[in-house]
Image (spheres, rainbow, N blue to C red):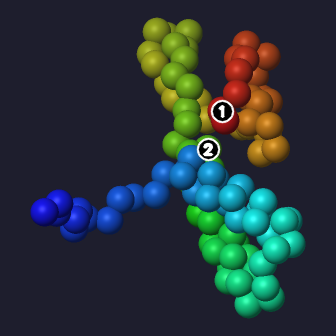
Amino acid sequence: MEKKKSAKKTMTFEDALEKLEEITNSLEGGELGLEESIQEFEKGIKLAKFCHDTLEKAERKIEILQKGGDGEITAKPVKARSDTGEIEDDDELQGSLL
């Protein structure tokens, strides 16, 4: 007999985004009834909030370490565009945070 895991798996950003995409496709398909559509929409809102909050936390945590003129390593916060994840505040840096 297979044992069920007692600890609930923590949802990742990627899991939430995948589920949100599934819900979106389901709602756009137009085959759900009104009540089921409302339930799926509510789930989607919760997942969208989770994704938004997760991205905000990640943005706050991300810092790029740079050496200053005195040789000390200092943390520098990075600003990124919310729509693309592109780093926007430093010409020396390139890349994406998404």
Callout 1 secondary element: loop
C-alpha span from label 2 to label 1? 8 Å
* Place of residue 17 in the rendered image (x, y in percent of width and height, measured from the top left): 64, 53
Label 2, residues with CA under 10 Å away: few <14, some 14-19, many ≥20: some
Q: Which amino acid type corresponds to the residue marked 2 in the rendered image?
A: Glu
Q: Name the residue under label 1.
A: 97
Along the horizontal axis of the image, is 64 left or right of 26?
A: left
Residue occupying the point 73% across, 76% down: 41
Work out which residue is located at the far front of the displayed protein and give it: 1
Whether residue 72 is visible, yes or no, is yes
In the image, 11 versus 83, the foreground residue is: 11
Along the horizontal axis of the image, is 6 left or right of 86?
A: left
Is 51 above or below relative to 43?
Answer: above
Whether residue 51 is visible, yes or no, is no
Label 1, residues with CA under 10 Å away: few <14, some 14-19, many ≥20: some
* Place of residue 44 in the rendered image (x, y in percent of width and height, measured from the top left): 69, 70
Quadrant in the picture for residue 3: bottom left
Marks 2 and 1, the one that precedes in the sequence = 2
Q: Which amino acid type corresponds to the residue marked 1 in the rendered image?
A: Leu
Residue occupying the point 78% across, 60% down: 25
Is 61 above or below relative to 68?
Answer: below
Along the horizontal axis of the image, is 4 left or right of 91?
A: left
Callout 2 secondary element: helix
In the image, 57 versus 50, the foreground residue is: 50
* Place of residue 13 in the rendered image (x, y in percent of width and height, measured from the top left): 55, 51
State the quadrant of the N terminus: bottom left
Is 21 above or below relative to 85?
Answer: below
Q: Mark 2 points at which residue?
A: 59
* Place of residue 73 in the rendered image (x, y in percent of width and height, measured from the top left): 46, 19
Residue occupying the point 71% across, 84% down: 36
Residue occupying the point 62% across, 65% down: 47
